[in-house]
Amino acid sequence: MTAKPRPGGRSARNKAAVFEAAAALLAEQGHEAVTMTDIAERAGMAPTSLYRRWGDVRALMMEVAVEKLMRERPLAATCSPGPARSQPASRAAKARRSFGP
């Protein structure tokens, strides 16, 4: 049995704590001085947890920056849904037909 991610669960709280810690350290120290260990300590987590999820500090900082940008400047809906977008079932049927019986 696979556990489903919970939007308000522990993972979400941990991610929020890490992002908050990363943003604060970035503002305080600049990007060249921030380490995964610093972020983990500030967030109350083990550095290995951060490495397991993000791999390195650059990947983590990139995700923090993208989330901040998306929160501050969400993508606007620039077009109205056309027939293909409003009927996903018909798109799926068309795709199945193109691959044969």
Image: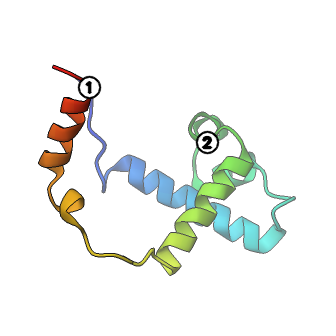
CA distance for labels 2 and 1 = 37 Å
Judged left or right of residue 74, residue 62 is right
Judged left or right of residue 76, residue 9 is left
- Find disc 2 in the rendering and name its residue: 54
Question: Which residue is painted at 47% across and 52% down in the image?
Answer: 14
Q: Quadrant of residue 39?
A: bottom right
Label 1: state its secondary structure: loop
Q: Position of residue 31 (x, y in %)?
A: 81, 62
Q: Quadrant of residue 4?
A: top left
All told, the count of numbered labels is 2
Judged left or right of residue 40, residue 17 is left
Residue kind at label 2, given as amino acid type? Trp
Question: Which residue is painted at 73% across and 50% down in the image?
Answer: 58
Q: Categorize mark 1 by other alpha carbons within 10 Å: few (<14), some (14-19), many (20+).
A: few
Residue kind at label 1, given as amino acid type? Phe
Q: Position of residue 9 (x, y in %)?
A: 32, 51
Label 2: state its secondary structure: helix
Work out whether residue 98 or residue 15 is closer to the camera in this orientation and state it. 98
Work out whether residue 97 or residue 63 is closer to the camera in this orientation and state it. 97
Indicate which disc, 2 or 1, sits on the residue closer to the N terminus: 2
Q: Which mark is residue 41?
A: none
Q: Position of residue 52 (x, y in %)?
A: 59, 33
Screen quadrant of the N terminus: top left
- Find disc 1 in the rendering and name its residue: 99
Question: Which residue is painted at 24% across and 36% down in the image?
Answer: 95
